[in-house]
Image (cartoon, rainbow, N blue to C red):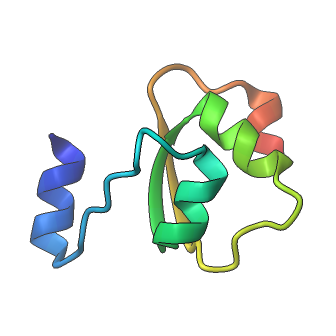
């Protein structure tokens, strides 16, 4: 709920990815400037051939974040 409230208060827009598309397909289609991920999703993002240039900020949560992932 915190993400929803922060987005509304900040005047942003929430884009909900399609469950029928891959992580990469949703990113390419929606081109978010800010994104909220869990560690597994960040690993996928970092493994992408071309990093998305439209991303400005990543909020990482869901559980403890491994130090090795933070360094990457």
The residue drawn where x is 56% and y is 74% is 56
Coordinates of residue 7 in the picture (x, y in percent): 20, 64
Q: For the N terminus, which image quadrant?
A: top left
Q: Is residue 57 shown above or below 33?
A: above
Q: Is residue 26 found left or right of 49 in the rendered image?
A: left
Q: Is residue 33 shown above or below 2?
A: below
The residue drawn where x is 46% and y is 69% is 30
Q: Is residue 20 shown above or below 46?
A: above
Quadrant for residue 67, please give it: top right
Outermost residue to the right: 49
The residue drawn where x is 17% and y is 52% is 4
Q: Is residue 62 found left or right of 44 in the rendered image?
A: left
The residue drawn where x is 70% and y is 70% is 52
Depth order, front residue of 23/67: 23
Coordinates of residue 26 in the picture (x, y in percent): 53, 57
Quadrant for residue 28, please give it: bottom right
Depth order, front residue of 63/40: 40
Coordinates of residue 70 in the picture (x, y in percent): 73, 40
Coordinates of residue 66 in the picture (x, y in percent): 71, 24
Outermost residue to the front: 20
Q: Is residue 6 found left or right of 24 in the rendered image?
A: left
């Amino acid at each position: 709920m915190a993400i929803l409230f922060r987005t509304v208060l900040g005047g942003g827009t929430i884009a909900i990815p399609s469950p029928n598309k891959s992580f990469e397909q949703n990113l390419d289609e929606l081109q978010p400037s800010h994104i909220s991920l869990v560690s597994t999703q960040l690993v996928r993002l970092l493994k992408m051939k071309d990093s998305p240039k439209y991303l400005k900020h990543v909020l990482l949560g869901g559980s403890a974040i491994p130090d090795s992932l933070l360094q990457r």
